[in-house]
Amino acid sequence: MDTKVYYLDRNNPDFDVLKYAGSVIRGGGTVVFPTETVYGLGANALDAKACKKIFEAKGRPQDNPLIVHVCSTSIDDFVEKIPDRAKKLMDRFWPGPLTIIFKKSKLIPDVITAGLDTVGIRMPSNNIARELVRQSGVPIAAPSANLSGRPSPTNVKHVIDDLYGKVDVILGGGNCDVGLESTVVDMTERPAILRPGGITYEQLKELIDDIYIDPAVMKKPDKNFRPKAPGMKYRHYAPKAKMVLIRGGLEDVVGKINELCRENMSKGLKVGILSTEQTYDKYPFGTVLSMGDRKRPETIAANIFDRLRQFDDLGVDLILSEAVEEKNIGLSIMNRMKKAAGYNIINI
Ligand code: TXA
Ligand code: MG
């Protein structure tokens, strides 16, 4: 397939390009676009045939539903009803990195929701994303624009590596601000966080007192595992190398990583180390990349997927990674890191 790539300035996007990309969506094609979380691979959410192309391009399992992207809070046509507390969340967090699960209306095709009677909807805050939806004139179904199983794309290079030749249009728009996917919240029953993401548990709790984190978020999946967000059961965000997370007091962690690094290098393995700004200088061996600043964990969120992909490009055999504290955005970061590591964690 011939893929057209355009680079847009997110503060001043070229409207001719957005109009064209909108017409591709309306015509049943696929368009990759930036959002504040990660890049999305979009198609007309009301067109089952167009949405099938998303699953094909990504190699995505059919039982994993897609998120529908909108450009306003007028979503009545797509849902059965908007519960009062869901409305509160929309007012506070939209546009932004929060996906809300509603009971779906008949307009939403089954292929999007993988046969569920619910649909996940979000209004992104990224200008290009919202303007693309507006120009299309239809809601846009979009999962992250990576090949299934790989780390989500947070810049246009990641997208091109995975999807060039498999989609009609790629809209580049710089690095994604948040760098982790949206938080998915189920508002059809007792409010539950099905996937932690850009909006934190602590932020949601301020508005919805009895919200809880679905136990599936914390657990290692086994064969009987049926999380409410089907996507949570797949090995996701996975770099090609084996990855191990080392968790504990920071000095002990540094010591352990150095020990494991030497041990594995002496076996002839190429070892990558995921450090932080605070520890970057403390690793004399291995290929060291910093995830960001521990004092500003949002920088770690923004970088983590890129660093995992960099290690792929560098061809390391083993990634030894520091852990971060599991609170606020740290919970979402650790959720992705644990999956990337296949729940391979050393506690010291
Ligand atoms: O930030 C994001 O959400 C990005 C950007 C592109 O918007 N999209 C994204 O989509 O991360 P995806 O497909 O990679 O992840 C969607 C997650 C999956 O875990 C899926 O199972 C869950 O949301 N999900 C979607 N619809 C659902 C539904 N009706 N019920 C439960 N979970 C749902
Ligand atoms: Mg994804």
Image (tube, grey):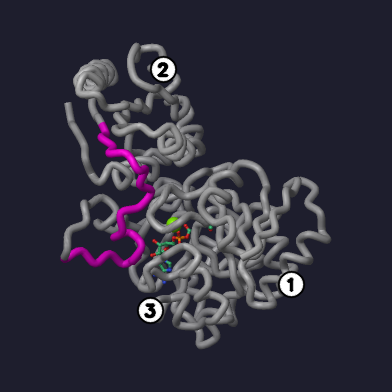
Q: Residue under circle 3? A: 116
Please tell me whether mark 2 or mark 3 is closer to you in this view: 2
**Residue 227 drawn in magenta:** yes
Residue displayed at 75% across by 68% down: 135
Residue at the spot x=59%, y=60% of the render?
165
The 10 Å Cα crowd at callout 2, few under 14, some 14 to 19, many 20 or more, is some
Q: In front here: 167 or 201?
A: 167
Q: Which residues are magenta?
A: 224-245
- Quick one: quadrant of the N terminus? bottom right
Q: Nearer the viewer, mark 3 or mark 1?
A: 1
Where's the C terminus, which quadrant?
A: top left
Residue 97 in the image: above or below residue 278:
below
Estimate the x, y position of residue 46 in percent, counting from the top left.
Answer: 58, 80
Residue at disc 3, secondary structure: loop
Q: Is residue 16 left or right of residue 172?
A: right
Mark identifier at residue 23: 1
- In the rendering, which numbered label is found on residue 136? none
Give x and y (percent) for residue 26: 69, 76
